[in-house]
Image (cartoon, rainbow, N blue to C red):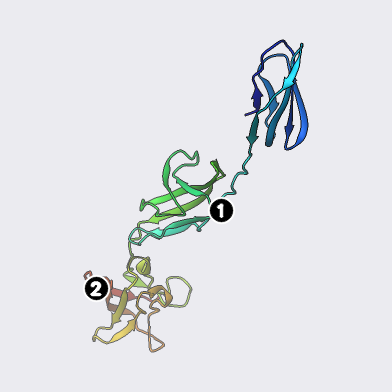
Amino acid sequence: TPIEVVVTGSSSWTVDYTLDGVPQSATGSISPVSLGNTAGVYVLTSISDANCSGAASGTQTITINPLPSAPLTSSDTTYCSTWTLVDMSASGGSGVFTWYADATLTNVEGTGATLVPNNTSGSVIYYVTETVNNCEGPASSVTITINECEIVIPTAFTPNGDMMNDFWEIVYLDDVYSESQVSVYNRWGEKVYESEKGNYAGKPWDGTFNDKLLPVGSYFYILDPGDGSDKRNGTVSIILKK
């Protein structure tokens, strides 16, 4: 918005002033006379019209604040719906961070350097800006994906070394049950495999016992979720394709 000086008298007018101490003048045939909107301190010194001139006084300041940069944010993250969600975070200057649910920045989710994402299935994009001196900068975004991670327990696998289905892969087990443990037994009740607690995917069962491939057949397993819920059990078969 420009600085404007309301004048009276006979057209036209000349307004003398200083801008940050440097002499300036502006002329106009109608009131008010605009002095422009350059940043700085404006000090009136005199005004003249078609007939006379006189001293004038008045001071006004225009301050132009820079826009803040887009905030730095935590990375995009994927969760299972059973997990505890971690706060998203934003950092930058000393301003106020505002989180939005839409790219048009109209639906406010919250303010502050952190925000807990909603546990909603699918992918949701959150937008965050920083406001300093009433100036809101551009937005950064964080994508949070929530998956319904149902574990899948195969009933058979083929550990024949062809790089296909060589391991008994229990999909999402570690994601859903972070303290789970799996044990496998032969028909005589001898334990032939036990997973590391909470890390089945680190070393899934490959059909061996004491580094030797076990014979074709069905084996009994017990899956302990490790969270106090009921254990699961069943059979898994080793099948060797010829």
Count the marks.
2
Q: Quadrant of the C terminus?
A: bottom left
Q: Residue placed at 74% from the left, 32% from the top?
A: 18
Marks 2/1: CA–CA distance:
55 Å
The three-letter amino acid code for the residue at tag 1 is: Gly
Q: Residue placed at 24% from the left, 85% from the top?
A: 189
Q: Measured from the top left, where is residue 106 in percent x and y? A: 46, 38
- In the image: residue 179, left or right of residue 105: left
- Along the line of sight, the residue nearer the viewer: 228 or 221: 228
Which residue is under mark 1? 93
- Local crowd at mark 1 within 10 Å, few (<14), some, or many (≥20)? some
> Which is more N-terminal, label 1 or label 2?
1
Q: Measured from the top left, where is residue 103 in percent x and y? A: 50, 41
User: Image height check: is 101 above or below 11?
Assistant: below
* Secondary element at image label 2: strand
The three-letter amino acid code for the residue at tag 2 is: Asn
- Along the line of sight, the residue nearer the viewer: 236 or 81: 81
Q: Residue placed at 77% from the left, 29% from the top?
A: 24
Q: Measured from the top left, where is residue 152 in percent x and y? A: 33, 65
- The answer to the question of whether label 2 and label 1 lie on touching residues, with beta carbons closer than 8 A, is no
Q: Measured from the top left, where is residue 144 in percent x and y? A: 44, 54
- Along the line of sight, the residue nearer the viewer: 92 or 223: 92
Q: Quadrant location of residue 92?
A: bottom right
Which residue is under mark 2? 233
User: Image height check: is 159 above or below 49?
Assistant: below
Q: Quadrant of the N terminus?
A: top right
- In the image: residue 233, left or right of residue 115: left
The disc at residue 236 is none
- Along the line of sight, the residue nearer the viewer: 87 or 212: 87
